[in-house]
Image: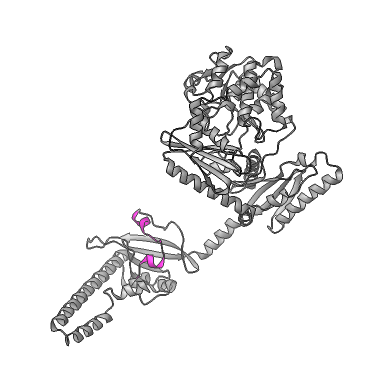
C-alpha cells in the first residue's frame, strides 16, 4: 500500500493532471495567486512527464534497434513476440521500462508494471553480474511457485547518454530445479554404527545375559532405522552398516541422532552404559569413497571418546554429541602392539626427534623425556625440539638438564632444521593437531611421523602417521608413554629423573590423581615408582612463589557466574599460563561449579583456559572459540581482541553449548 501511494504521487500517470487542474480551478475561488501558482506547477510537471516519456520511448526504440541489428519490421516483431518473458530495465535502479506479455503473465500485474523495479518484484535481485560482464544470473530466481534462470545483456544508448539499459530473458527452469533437488536428496549416504564398549559390556556376563543385552541394542538400532527407509545390516559382532539417502540424513540430523540416547539407557550387570559411535560418509564421488569417509568419521568419533556422531564430507567434519566420559580400556593389547611398532620405526630411522605442543607443559615434556629413554635404548641419536623461552615446564627442564644425561638433547627448532635428513623420525607428544605443535613448519619436513596423544581428536589432526598411539581415555600423554616403556625398555634403563618426569606429567593432568585417574593410571604410576620416582620430588615441581600465589587469587577474584553452573574469570591484566590453569582448577572446588573458564591477555591476544569435572565437555565448548583439548581440560586463543570482546565471545559460546546440549537432551 505504501508503494502504491508513493507511485500515485509520482509523475507518469496522465489522469492525475486533470485532478491537479480541478484543484487549481477550485483554488481560484479563494486565491487567484494560489490558483495561478498551482497551474504553473501542474504545467511544469506535465512538461517533465512528456519529456521523460519521450526520452524513455526513444531509449527503448534505440535499444530495440541496436538489439535487432537493423533487421526488417517483421523480424523485429518476431523478437517482441518471442515466447519468453522479456524485460527491458534501467541497469542502475532496475526500473522496468518495457516488458512483453509473457512477463505480464509471470508477474500478473498489468496496471503498474512500468512503475515497478526489479527489487519490488524480486527482493534482493541486483544487476552487479551484468556490470561484471556476466550473462547469466548466479542463481535461479523464484517468482511465485516457479523458478527462472535469468539471462541478460546490456547496451548503451546510441545517443551517447550515460543511461544504460539491459534486457533480461526469463527461462522457466522449475522442472530442472525439481529434478536437481530430487537428485541431491536421493544421493546415497553410508553410515557405520559401532558399539563403543562391547568388551566392557559382555565382560563377566553369561551367555544368556550377553544375548539379551546385544538383542536389546539390536532392537533399538533397528527401531531407529525403521522409519528412515534405508538398509541396515550387521556385519560384525559390534558393527552395523547403514545405507540411506541424503533426505534421510537431514531427518536424523534434525532428530540429533536420538539412537545415542536410547542405547545409552542399556546398562550391563556391572553398571556400564552401552554407547554408540556413528561415522557417516557423504558427498563422495562413489560409494567406495563414501564408505572410506564413513570409516574416517568413525575413527574420529572413537578418538574423541565415542558416544557421538561424526559426519565426513569432502571438505570437513561435523560433530554431534560427545558429552559422555570416555570408557577406560583395561586391556593393554594396543599398548604392546604400538610399542613394537614404534620400536621398529625407531630402529629403521637414522635419528629421532620429539616435539610437544605450543608452550610445552610438564606433561608434554615428561612424555618427551620418556620417548628419549626409548630411543636411547635402541642406540639412536635423539633430540627434543622446543622453544626454551616459551616453555611452561622450566623447573622440570632445569631438573632434567641438571642430571647430566641430557646434554645437547633439548634444541631449538632452528637447530633441528639443520639436522633433519630423509630418514629422520618425528614423534609428536601431547597433541594431535599440526598447527598446535611447537614448530609447525618443522613438522611438514618429516616423512615419518608418530603421534602419542590423549586429547580428543580435532578435525584438523595430523594425517598419514606411521604410528598413532591415540587414547582419549588415558589421563595424560605421560601415562601412554609409561605404558609403552614397559614393553620397550627394561626397568633398570630408566633413570630416576626420567621416571619422575613421567610421574610429574601424570600428576599434572590428573590434578594430583583426583581427575580422570583410572586403573591404568595408577598402574603406570606404580611402574614409575618402582623405577625410582620420588613423589615428594615431583610435588616440589609444582610449588609456587608468593607472587604467583597472589596473582592466582587475583584472577579468582574476577570470577562471575555464567549459565549452566559455569564460572568465568576474565582478567584484564597479564597472567602466566600456569597461574591461569591453577586458577581454573581452584574454581572447580566451589560447590555447584561444573566448569571453569579463565581468560587473560598475552600481547594482542586473549588466552582461554577451561577446566571441568566431566559434566561439561570443555573441548566442545572451546572448539566454538577455535581451540580444543579433552573432556576435562581444554584451551583456546582469541587473536587480536581485547578482554571485553573476549568475555562476550566466551558467554556466547557458553550459551551455544548449553543450547546444543538442551536440544540433544530433548
Residue 112 visible in this rendered orientation of the protein: yes
Residue 435 versus residue 275: which sits nearer the camera? 275
Q: Quadrant of the C terminus?
A: bottom right
Residue 315 visible in this rendered orientation of the protein: no
Measuring from the top left, give residue 438's x and y in whole percent. Answer: 51, 28
Residue 189 versus residue 623: which sits nearer the camera? 623
Farthest-out residue, top? 404
Farthest-out residue, bottom? 29
Measuring from the top left, give residue 157's x and y in whole percent. Answer: 26, 63
**Looking at the picture, does residue 146 appear above or below residue 528?**
below
Measuring from the top left, give residue 401's x and y in whole percent. Answer: 55, 15
**Looking at the picture, does residue 571 appear above or below residue 225?**
above
- Residue at 41% x, 64% y: name it: 123
- Residue at 86% x, 46% y: name it: 208
Residue 548 versus residue 274: which sits nearer the camera? 548
Farthest-out residue, left? 33
Q: Quadrant of the N terminus?
A: bottom left
**Looking at the picture, does residue 287 appear above or below residue 469?**
below
Residue 22 versus residue 76: which sits nearer the camera? 22
- Residue at 35% x, 54% y: name it: 133
In the rendered structure, the answer to whether residue 605 lies left or right of residue 308 reads left
Colour scheme of this structure image? one colour
Residue 379: name its quadrant.
top right
Q: Is residue 122 magenta?
A: yes
In the rendered structure, the answer to whether residue 430 lies left or right of residue 228 reads left
Measuring from the top left, give residue 340's x and y in whole percent. Answer: 70, 24
Residue 515: name its quadrant.
top right
Residue 104: name its quadrant.
bottom left
**How many numbered marks does the figure carry?**
0
In the rendered structure, the answer to whether residue 311 lies left or right of residue 268 reads left
Q: The magenta stretch spans which residues?
A: 116-131
Q: Is residue 317 magenta?
A: no
Amino acid at each position: 500500500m505504501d508503494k502504491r501511494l508513493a507511485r500515485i504521487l509520482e509523475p507518469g500517470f496522465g489522469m492525475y493532471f486533470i485532478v491537479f487542474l480541478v484543484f487549481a480551478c477550485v483554488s481560484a475561488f479563494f486565491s487567484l495567486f494560489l490558483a495561478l501558482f498551482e497551474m504553473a506547477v501542474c504545467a511544469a510537471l506535465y512538461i517533465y512527464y512528456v519529456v521523460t516519456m519521450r526520452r524513455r520511448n526513444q531509449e527503448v526504440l534505440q535499444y530495440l534497434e541496436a538489439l535487432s541489428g537493423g533487421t526488417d519490421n517483421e523480424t523485429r516483431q518476431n523478437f517482441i513476440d518471442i515466447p519468453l518473458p522479456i524485460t527491458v530495465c534501467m541497469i542502475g535502479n532496475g526500473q522496468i521500462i518495457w516488458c512483453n506479455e509473457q512477463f505480464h503473465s509471470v508477474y500478473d500485474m498489468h496496471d503498474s508494471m512500468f512503475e515497478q523495479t526489479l527489487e519490488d518484484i524480486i527482493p534482493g535481485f541486483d544487476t552487479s553480474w551484468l556490470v561484471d560482464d556476466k550473462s547469466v544470473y548466479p542463481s535461479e530466481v523464484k517468482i511465485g511457485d516457479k523458478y527462472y534462470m535469468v539471462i541478460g545483456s546490456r547496451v548503451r544508448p546510441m545517443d551517447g547518454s550515460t543511461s544504460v539499459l539491459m534486457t533480461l530473458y526469463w527461462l522457466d527452469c522449475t522442472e530442472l530445479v525439481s529434478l536437481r533437488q530430487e537428485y541431491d536428496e536421493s544421493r546415497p549416504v553410508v553410515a557405520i554404527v559401532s558399539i563403543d564398549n562391547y568388551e566392557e559390556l559382555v565382560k563377566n556376563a553369561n551367555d544368556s545375559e550377553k544375548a539379551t543385552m546385544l538383542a536389546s541394542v539390536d532392537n533399538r538400532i533397528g527401531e531407529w532405522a525403521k522409519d528412515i527407509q534405508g538398509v541396515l545390516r550387521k556385519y560384525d559382532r559390534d558393527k552395523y552398516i547403514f545405507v540411506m539417502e541424503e533426505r534421510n540424513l537431514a531427518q536424523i540430523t534434525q532428530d540429533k541422532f536420538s539412537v545415542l540416547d536410547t542405547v545409552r539407557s542399556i546398562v550391563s550387570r556391572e553398571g556400564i552404559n552401552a554407547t554408540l559411535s556413528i561415522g557417516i560418509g557423504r558427498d563422495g564421488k562413489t560409494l567406495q569413497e563414501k564408505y572410506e569417509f564413513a570409516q574416517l568419521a568413525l575413527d574420529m568419533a572413537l578418538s574423541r571418546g565415542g558416544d557421538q556422531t561424526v559426519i565426513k564430507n569432502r571438505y570437513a567434519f561435523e560433530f554431534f554429541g560427545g558429552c559422555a566420559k570416555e570408557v577406560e580400556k583395561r586391556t593393554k593389547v594396543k599398548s604392546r602392539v604400538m610399542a613394537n611398532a614404534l620400536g621398529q620405526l625407531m630402529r629403521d630411522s637414522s635419528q629421532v626427534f620429539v616435539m610437544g605442543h605450543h608452550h610445552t607443559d610438564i606433561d608434554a615434556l615428561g612424555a618427551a623425556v620418556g620417548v628419549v629413554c626409548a630411543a636411547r635404548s635402541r642406540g639412536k641419536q635423539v633430540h627434543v625440539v622446543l622453544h626454551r623461552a616459551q616453555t611452561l615446564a622450566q623447573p622440570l627442564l632445569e631438573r632434567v638438564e641438571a642430571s647430566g644425561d641430557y646434554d645437547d638433547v633439548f634444541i631449538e627448532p632452528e637447530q633441528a632444521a639443520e639436522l633433519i635428513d630423509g630418514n629422520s623420525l618425528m614423534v609428536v607428544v601431547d597433541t594431535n593437531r599440526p598447527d598446535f605443535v611447537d614448530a609447525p613448519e618443522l613438522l611438514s619436513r618429516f616423512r615419518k611421523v608418530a603421534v602419542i596423544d590423549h586429547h580428543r581428536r580435532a578435525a584438523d589432526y595430523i594425517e598419514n602417521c606411521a604410528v598413532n598411539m591415540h587414547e582419549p581415555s588415558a589421563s595424560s600423554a605421560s601415562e601412554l608413554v609409561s605404558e609403552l616403556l614397559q614393553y620397550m625398555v627394561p626397568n633398570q634403563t630408566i633413570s630416576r629423573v626420567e621416571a619422575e618426569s613421567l610421574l610429574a606429567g601424570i600428576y599434572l593432568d590428573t590434578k594430583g590423581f583426583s581427575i580422570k585417574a583410572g586403573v591404568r593410571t595408577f598402574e603406570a604410576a606404580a611402574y614409575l615408582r618402582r623405577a625410582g620416582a620420588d613423589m615428594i620430588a615431583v610435588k616440589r615441581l609444582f610449588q609456587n612463589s608468593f607472587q604467583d600465589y597472589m596473582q592466582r587469587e587475583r584472577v579468582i577474584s574476577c570470577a562471575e557466574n555464567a549459565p549452566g553452573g559455569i564460572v568465568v574469570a576474565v582478567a584484564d591484566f597479564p597472567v602466566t599460563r600456569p597461574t591461569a590453569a591453577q586458577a581454573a582448577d581452584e574454581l572447580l572446588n566451589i560447590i555447584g561449579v561444573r566448569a571453569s573458564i579463565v581468560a587473560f591477555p598475552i600481547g594482542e591476544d586473549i588466552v582461554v583456559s577451561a577446566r571441568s569435572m566431566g559434566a561439561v565437555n570443555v573441548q566442545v565448548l572451546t572448539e566454538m572459540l577455535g581451540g580444543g583439548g579433552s573432556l576435562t581440560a581444554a584451551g583456546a586463543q582469541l587473536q587480536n581482541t581485547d578482554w571485553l570482546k573476549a568475555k562476550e565471545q566466551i558467554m556466547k559460546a557458553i550459551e551455544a553449548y548449553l543450547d546444543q546440549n538442551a536440544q540433544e537432551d530433548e
